[in-house]
């Protein structure tokens, strides 16, 4: 059976800048986020995730003007995360042009927010963002505030609860491997994907084409969020699409380049 996988570009933003770190720390400025967004869109990316990485600190999302500009000529699903604490925050993100919102800190502090957003805007709009750190053999703990704060919650249990509360998708980030390009935590991804009947986006650690194969076929992820490998041109989408054509067990949507 062929496994279909979506490719997603993840853009972590601080202020006006696209940034990248390792394990969500040591952040380096790379440029304007929409310059990268347009590049990936023209190369055929399936979706884009914008994450305001300091939104929880300031309790507000500062990406809305960036999203408004992006959606003038980018016509693929866009998810916005960071600082989503209320129905009003979701309204603002959707009015700016986002299709989905990713909720982490807001859901950890008030889980019923997942239900409120799902009932008001639909589960397809509601993404539960989970930051996971390994806590023992076959165990991971949920973190929030860009990987800085512990919760004491088990990742698999939280994923199940998030689904029951109304989340329609899970963005699962391995904090331990994020930005390392050393490969993804396939065991973590498989445990979460096997525990919920909704799509799981794997994030953190991708460094090679074989990582895509592993996370899709062994981790059973439905999508892969890429940052480091795209931002630093370690992999490009044309290369991924060409490689995918030779993989009988994988199907990656290959689209014609878009002129923008």
Image: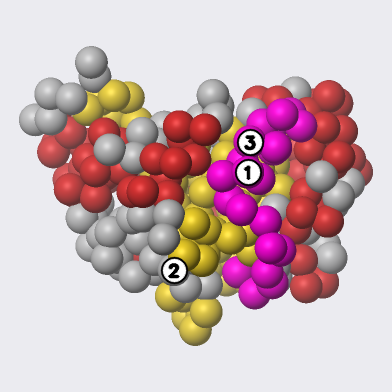
Q: CA distance from mark 2 to mark 3?
A: 22 Å
State yes or no: residue 163 in magenta.
yes
Of badges 2 and 1, the one in the foreground is 1
Q: State the SS at label 3.
A: helix
Image mark for residue 176: 2
Task: Report which residue position mark 1 lands on.
Answer: 157
As displayed, is residue 187 above or below residue 74? below
State yes or no: residue 204 in magenta.
no
Of badges 2 and 3, the one in the foreground is 3
Any part of residue 149 in sight: yes
Task: Report which residue position mark 3 lands on.
Answer: 160
As displayed, is residue 245 above or below residue 186? above
Quadrant (top left, top right, bottom left, bottom right) of the C terminus: top left
Region of the chain picked out in magenta, as a range:
147-167
Position of residue 73 measured from the top left corner of the image (x, y, whole percent): 54, 39
Any part of residue 255 in sight: no
Q: Classify residue 145 by image quadrant.
A: bottom right
């Amino acid at each position: 059976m062929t496994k279909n996988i979506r490719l997603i570009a993840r853009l972590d933003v601080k202020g006006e800048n696209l940034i990248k770190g390792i394990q969500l720390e040591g952040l380096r400025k790379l440029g304007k986020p929409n310059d990268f967004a347009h590049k990936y869109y023209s190369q055929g990316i399936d979706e884009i995730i914008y994450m305001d990485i300091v939104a929880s600190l300031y309790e507000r999302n500062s990406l809305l003007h960036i999203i408004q500009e992006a959606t003038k000529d980018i016509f693929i699903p866009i998810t916005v995360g960071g600082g989503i604490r209320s129905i009003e925050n979701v309204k603002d993100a959707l009015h700016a042009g986002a299709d989905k919102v990713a909720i982490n800190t807001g859901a950890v502090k008030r889980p019923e927010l997942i239900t409120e957003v799902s009932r008001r805007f639909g589960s397809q709009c509601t993404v539960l963002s989970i930051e996971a750190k390994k806590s023992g053999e076959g165990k991971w703990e949920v973190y929030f505030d860009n990987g800085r704060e512990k919760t004491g919650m088990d990742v698999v249990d939280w994923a199940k609860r998030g689904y029951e509360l109304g989340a329609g998708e899970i963005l699962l980030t391995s904090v331990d491997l994020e930005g390392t390009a050393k490969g993804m935590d396939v065991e973590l991804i498989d445990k979460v994907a096997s525990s919920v009947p909704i799509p799981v986006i794997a994030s953190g650690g991708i460094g090679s084409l074989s990582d895509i194969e592993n996370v899709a076929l062994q981790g059973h992820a439905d999508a892969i969020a890429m940052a480091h490998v795209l931002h630093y041109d370690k992999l490009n989408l044309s290369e991924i699409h060409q490689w995918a054509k030779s993989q009988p067990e994988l199907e990656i949507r290959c689209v014609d380049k878009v002129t923008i």
